[in-house]
Image (spheres, rainbow, N blue to C red):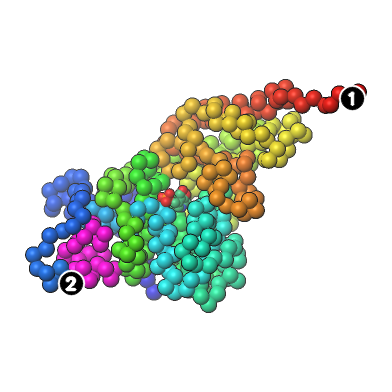
């Protein structure tokens, strides 16, 4: 059985700085070369055919790249770098996180066209699996239902931890045990390789939307799958056939972002912990969902499976208690009150996505998870009062000043005198 490599003795901070750069001295460069070629000249037709055959069948490299859909050296460099940071044998890069998830599902469907999906999960992943777009059938369950959901034709178990947007944590090793040898794909986007390495807990695939923390500056889309060399070969075959390639410029930008990944994650995580605690104490906040709070991590995943709770949290807005009689449930709060909260934010950016240098906020029920059926939203608490905050690397006091201003305005706007009066019909 494939075992992932233990990291080299250097710390993840040092590995992130040097990964993908080991040949720079011999190349005589100090920044990664970018190769934008779409085709590559050959001198010997027989050698070219041999290289083509090797790449089409999933080899990581060959004597000649032949054509950019088969191989690109800048992309291969970032793949080697991320594999090293994650402690994996191999990594395969795609044009986006969704392209990576698609490739994983297609690669696994060779084994069976049934997928077990663990909810909650990112809205588009849920949609991709529920819609049947890829010709697979999905059984949805929670982490404890995996064993019962497995069928003879199950090819893949899909889960996300921490999960988007409720930050639910899943014990990867337990799901791997329950999967009885069926490959398990873990979307580890929220954790990054700095905080979690699913392969060490038995997962077959560790997947990242590189659009988030790995690229980290809101300017690059990409998807990455860390896995064994054998599983990577199949993923490369799918990539060659479907063409969902990471562009070499995106690979370059990603390589440029990796050295600062640990610092960005640690800085944002420290602020997220602080913000989560302050939100918990705020009168306009009903609930805070964050793996750093013991209430959200009853089985101690942080410290065992994750090196830290990460930099994304969600919270529920509620009218302060004294107004609870008129507005008690999420659906009862008029949307203009939520808009008033957004309007007051001047530094925090109202936007989807996460893992950027700046703090981002969004309302999952209205945006990232809007595509889900209403009952699925309700079952997982993805209601209009839920806000997801991706904490950036700004000074925590500036983040809090902005957020708490918005919360205060929300609280004030909830006061009965601020709402339009509904007059009782005058009795004649
Ligand atoms: C957890 C998670 N996985 C996958 C994706 C999809 O990634 P991309 O937008 O790069 O396709 C996202 C996007 O938000 C996400 O949050």
Question: Disc 2 marks which residue?
Answer: 50
* Residue at figure coordinates x 65%, y 28% from the top left: 411
Question: Regarding mark 1 in the picture, which secondary structure is present there?
Answer: loop
Please name whichever residue, 160 or 132, is drawn nearer the observer in this view of the structure.
Answer: 132
Whether residue 394 is in magenta: the answer is: no
Which labelled disc corresponds to residue 205?
none
Q: Which residue is farthest bottom? A: 152
User: Does 181 sit above or below residue 417?
Assistant: below
Total labels drawn:
2
List x then y, in percent, for residue 296.
59, 49
Q: Which residue matches tag 1? A: 427
Which contiguous range is marked in magenta?
A: 50-72
For this orientation, the residue located farthest to the right is 428
Mark 2 touches mark 1? (CB < 8 Å): no
Seen in the picture, residue 188 relative to 423 is either above or below; the reply is below
| Residue sitting at x 21%, y 55% | 38
| Residue 175, position as x, y percentages in the image | 53, 65
Query: Where does the image place residue 233, in percent across and percent down from the top left?
Result: 32, 68
What residue is shown at x 38% (from left), y 52% (from top)?
Answer: 96
Q: Is residue 65 magenta?
A: yes
Q: In front: mark 2 or mark 1? A: 1
The N terminus - image quarter? bottom left
Q: Earlier in the sequence, mark 2 or mark 1?
A: 2
In the image, farthest residue toward the left: 43
Q: Is residue 300 visible?
A: no
Residue 287 is left or right of residue 269, and the answer is right
Q: Can residue 256 be spotted in the picture?
A: yes
In the rendered view, tell whether residue 363 sits above or below residue 69.
Answer: above
Q: CA distance from mark 2 to mark 1?
A: 91 Å
User: Is disc 2 placed on a helix, strand or loop?
Assistant: helix
Residue under the image location 77 percent in, 26 percent down: 422
Secondary structure that dominates the magenta span: loop
């Amino acid at each position: 059985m494939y075992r992932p490599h233990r990291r080299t003795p250097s710390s993840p901070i040092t590995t992130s700085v040097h990964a993908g750069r080991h040949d720079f001295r011999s190349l005589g460069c100090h920044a990664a070369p970018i190769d934008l070629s779409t085709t590559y000249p050959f001198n010997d037709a027989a050698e070219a055919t041999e290289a083509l055959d090797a790449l089409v069948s999933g080899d990581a490299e060959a004597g000649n790249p032949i054509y950019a859909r088969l191989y690109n050296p800048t992309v291969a460099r970032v793949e080697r770098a991320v594999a090293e940071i994650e402690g994996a044998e191999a990594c395969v890069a795609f044009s986006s996180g969704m392209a990576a998830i698609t490739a994983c599902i297609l690669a696994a469907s060779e084994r069976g066209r049934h997928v077990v999906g663990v909810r909650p999960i990112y809205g588009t992943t849920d949609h991709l699996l529920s819609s049947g777009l890829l010709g697979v059938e999905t059984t949805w369950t929670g982490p404890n239902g995996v064993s019962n959901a497995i069928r003879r034709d199950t090819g893949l178990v899909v889960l996300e931890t921490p999960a988007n947007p409720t930050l639910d944590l899943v014990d990867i090793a337990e799901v791997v045990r329950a999967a009885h040898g069926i490959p398990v794909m873990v979307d580890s986007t929220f954790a990054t390789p700095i905080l979690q390495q699913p392969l060490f807990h038995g997962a077959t695939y560790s997947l990242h939307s590189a659009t988030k923390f790995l690229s980290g500056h809101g300017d690059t889309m990409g998807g990455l799958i860390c896995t064994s060399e054998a599983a990577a070969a199949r993923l490369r075959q799918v990539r060659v056939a479907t063409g969902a390639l990471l562009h070499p410029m995106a690979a370059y930008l990603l390589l440029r972002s990796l050295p600062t990944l640990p610092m960005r994650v640690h800085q944002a995580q420290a602020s997220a912990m602080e913000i989560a605690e302050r939100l918990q104490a705020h009168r306009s906040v009903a609930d805070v969902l964050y793996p750093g709070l013991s209430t959200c991590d009853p089985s101690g995943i942080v410290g065992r499976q994750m090196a830290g709770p990460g930099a994304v949290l969600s919270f529920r807005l509620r009218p302060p208690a004294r107004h609870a009689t008129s507005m008690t449930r999420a659906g009862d709060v008029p949307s203009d009150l939520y808009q008033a909260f957004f309007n007051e934010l001047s530094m925090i950016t109202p936007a989807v996505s996460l893992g950027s240098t700046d703090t981002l906020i969004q309302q999952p029920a209205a945006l990232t998870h809007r595509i889900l059926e209403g009952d699925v939203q309700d079952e997982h608490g993805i209601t209009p009062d839920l806000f997801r905050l991706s904490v950036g690397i700004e000074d925590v006091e500036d983040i809090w000043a902005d957020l708490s201003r918005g919360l205060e305005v929300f609280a004030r706007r909830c006061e009965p005198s601020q709402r339009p009066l509904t007059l009782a019909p005058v009795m004649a």
